[in-house]
């Protein structure tokens, strides 16, 4: 019987609780949450008997904790916790796309320098295992292009605007009420959130660390009722499309609202759903769709990373890089 691994969990918000609920259902996994670090220790937490602390060192420096799972929204603190954990020999799972997207050059070094494993499937596609696919299955097929809907919040807002003729403000409030959008939705609606995800996929697809400053991002706030009406008369929809491709030897990444036709694989991807299409030289185009926002889809992606971690899996990108910018 495998020895049970002890988990140190950072964060017990929407995603943290989603992971906790998912883990309770996976009783076959040889892992248990030993300690949880939260910002406010005084908040009442009902329905479990977890140990809570507000001292990060109780997790990071505890020799009995094997795995750190980082699910907080503070990118600066998250980076510090992840780096410290890897340096201490603890494997790490994270869902923090902002921290990972902004720190890819350092993360590339961490993958090479430390023996401990760092996985972050939940940072990109919610319940879609796209990082695992791009880093593994598609690695030897030469990726030509990745295109998709990578932000469930933006897609939900645009769907409500188009199906129910809601204003942007109405749709945003509804998305926030349902937990699909943050109270400060700037990263989602501006396209920056999807840009972080694109940078992670570009790193794994092309083995290079792209420059976020070269990305082009356009806000969905620019989508007016008039544009929606024109799209509808043509039988089309407006979708928040993110694209990566190699143009003249350079990685080109764009995020912007675009018109899509009924024959487009992204046309029927509505509400908080995500979809990602990977076009390869050998096997052509592959498209996967699934929930891209909410606690349970993201929590399930963390569970899948935990399963891979317990089986000894690690990313291949550091072992087969082309060049690093």
Image (spheres, grey):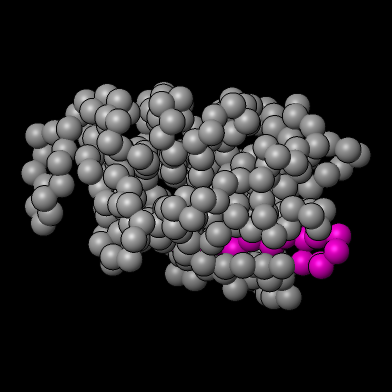
Would residue 188 appear left or right of 277 to someone viewing this image? left
Would residue 122 appear left or right of 7 to someone viewing this image? right
For this orientation, the residue located farthest to the right is 248
Q: Nearer the viewer, residue 242 or 204?
A: 204
In the image, residue 284 lies in the stretch drawn in magenta: yes
Q: What residue is at 52 percent from the left and 67 percent from the top?
A: 290
* Residue 130 percent coordinates (x, y): 60, 57
Compared with residue 208, is residue 287 higher up or lower down, i.e. above or below? below
Q: What residue is at 30 percent from the left and 52 percent from the top?
A: 4
Would residue 205 appear left or right of 62 to someone viewing this image? right
* Residue 277 percent coordinates (x, y): 69, 62
Asked if residue 247 shows in the view, the reply is yes
* Residue 253 percent coordinates (x, y): 72, 42
For this orientation, the residue located farthest to the front is 1
Asked if residue 19 shows in the view, the reply is no
In the image, residue 117 lies in the stretch drawn in magenta: no
Q: Nearer the viewer, residue 171 or 288?
A: 288
Q: From the image, which quarter does the C terminus lie in? A: top right
Q: From the image, which quarter does the N terminus lie in? A: bottom left
Secondary structure mainly formed by the magenta segment:
strand
Q: Nearer the viewer, residue 120 or 187?
A: 120
* Residue 40 percent coordinates (x, y): 17, 32
Compared with residue 59, is residue 293 higher up or lower down, i.e. above or below? below
Q: What residue is at 48 percent from the left and 61 percent from the top?
A: 127
Compared with residue 291, is residue 9 higher up or lower down, i.e. above or below? above
Query: Magenta residues?
Result: 272-285
Q: What residue is at 33 percent from the left and 48 percent from the top?
A: 5
Count of labels in the image: 0
């Amino acid at each position: 019987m495998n020895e049970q691994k002890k988990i140190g969990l950072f964060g017990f918000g929407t995603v943290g609780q989603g992971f906790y609920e998912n883990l309770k259902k996976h009783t076959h996994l040889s892992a248990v949450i030993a300690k949880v670090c939260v910002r406010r220790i005084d908040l009442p937490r009902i329905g479990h008997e977890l140990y809570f602390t507000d001292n990060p060192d109780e997790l990071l420096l505890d020799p009995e904790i094997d795995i750190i799972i980082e699910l907080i929204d503070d990118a600066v603190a998250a980076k510090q916790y992840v780096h410290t954990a890897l340096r201490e020999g603890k494997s790490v799972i994270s869902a923090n796309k902002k921290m990972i997207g902004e720190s890819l050059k350092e993360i590339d070094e961490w993958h090479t320098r430390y023996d401990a494993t760092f996985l972050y499937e939940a940072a990109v596609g919610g319940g879609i295992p796209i990082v695992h696919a791009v880093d593994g299955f598609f690695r030897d097929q030469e990726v030509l292009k990745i295109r998709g809907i990578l932000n469930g919040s933006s897609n939900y807002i645009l769907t409500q605007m188009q199906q129910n003729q809601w204003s942007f403000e109405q749709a945003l409030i509804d998305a926030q009420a349902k937990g699909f959008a943050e109270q400060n939705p700037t990263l989602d609606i501006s396209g920056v959130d999807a840009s972080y995800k694109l940078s992670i996929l570009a790193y794994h697809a092309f083995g290079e660390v792209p420059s976020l400053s070269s990305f082009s991002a356009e806000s969905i706030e620019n989508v007016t009722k008039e544009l929606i009406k024109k799209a509808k008369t043509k039988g089309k929809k407006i979708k928040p499309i993110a694209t990566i491709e190699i143009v003249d030897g350079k990685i080109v990444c764009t995020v912007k609202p675009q018109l899509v036709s009924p024959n487009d694989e992204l046309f029927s991807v509505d509400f908080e759903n995500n979809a990602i299409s990977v076009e390869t030289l050998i096997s052509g185009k592959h498209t996967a769709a699934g929930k891209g926002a909410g606690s349970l889809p993201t929590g399930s992606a963390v569970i899948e990373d935990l399963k891979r971690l317990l089986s000894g899996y690690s990313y291949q990108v550091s072992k087969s890089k082309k060049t690093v910018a």
